[in-house]
Amino acid sequence: MYNRFTFHKNTFAVFIKTNEPEGFVKAHYISKHGSQYFFTNDGVYRYSNHWGRVGNCRWRLENIDYKQQTNYWGFCKWIHFYTNEEGLPLFFIEKTDNDHYSYNHKNNAENEQAVFRTASETAKILKKITEIQQTADWAKHLEYNDYEVLKNFFIQQLIHSTKSFIKIKQEYISDSKL
C-alpha cells in the first residue's frame, strides 16, 4: 500500500475532483512545479494545474481535460494508487463521458473484456481515437451510410481488440465488399 512517502514513485491514480480541504493552513509539500500536496491518513489532496503524466507517474483527474492549465483540487485514497511500470500491459481505455475517452489501470477494470496495453500502446490508441473524433480524413476511402456509426465502430474496435487501425480498416473494406 502506498503512503505519503511512496505515492509519487512510479504510480497510477485517478484523483476525484474536489473542493479545497478544510483544516489545512499550508501544504505539507510543494513540488518544484508548484503542485501542492496535503496528506491525510486516508489519502492525498493535490492542487495543481497539470495532470496526466506527472514525473514518472500517471495521475488522472476524473472527468477533467488535464491538458488545461487551470488549477484543480483532487483527492485520491492511498488504496487507489497502483504501480505504473511503462513496459507492462497495465492500462485499458474507457469512455469517461459523452465523447471523451481516457486510460485507466487494470486494477480498476470492472469489465472482464477490457484489453490491457502498455502505457505507450494506450497513448497511441487514444491519439487515434482523437483523430477519428476530430477529422473525417481517416474515412475518405471507406464506403458507409452513416458516418457516426462508422466512427463508433472504429473506436469500439480500437478499444476492445488488439487489432491495429490498419487491420481494422482492411477488415472493414473486405467485409463491405461482400
Image: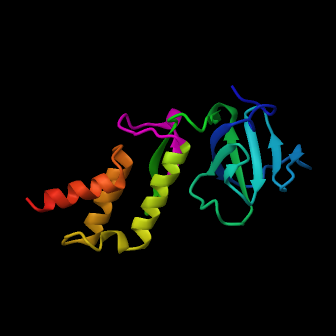
Q: How is the image coloured?
A: rainbow
Residue at (36% x, 74% y) in the render: 137
Q: Position of residue 149 (x, y in %)?
A: 26, 65
Relative to 76, 151 lies left or right: left
The residue closer to the viewer here, 102 or 38, is 102
The residue closer to the viewer here, 24 or 150, is 150
Q: Give the residue furthest to the left.
A: 178
Residue at (14% x, 62% y) in the render: 176
What residue range appears in magenta? 102-118
For the N terminus, give its image quadrant.
top right
- As displayed, is residue 135 above or below residue 152? below
Q: Position of residue 97 (x, y in %)?
A: 47, 58
Q: Quadrant of residue 41?
A: top right
The residue closer to the viewer here, 133 or 29, is 133
Q: Is residue 56 magenta?
A: no
Q: Position of residue 118 (x, y in %)?
A: 52, 40
Q: Quadrant of residue 152?
A: bottom left
Q: Give the residue furthest to the top.
A: 1
Residue at (33% x, 53% y) in the render: 156
- As displayed, is residue 57 above or below residue 147? above
Relative to 3, 28 lies left or right: right
Q: Is residue 104 magenta?
A: yes
Relative to 145, 161 lies left or right: right
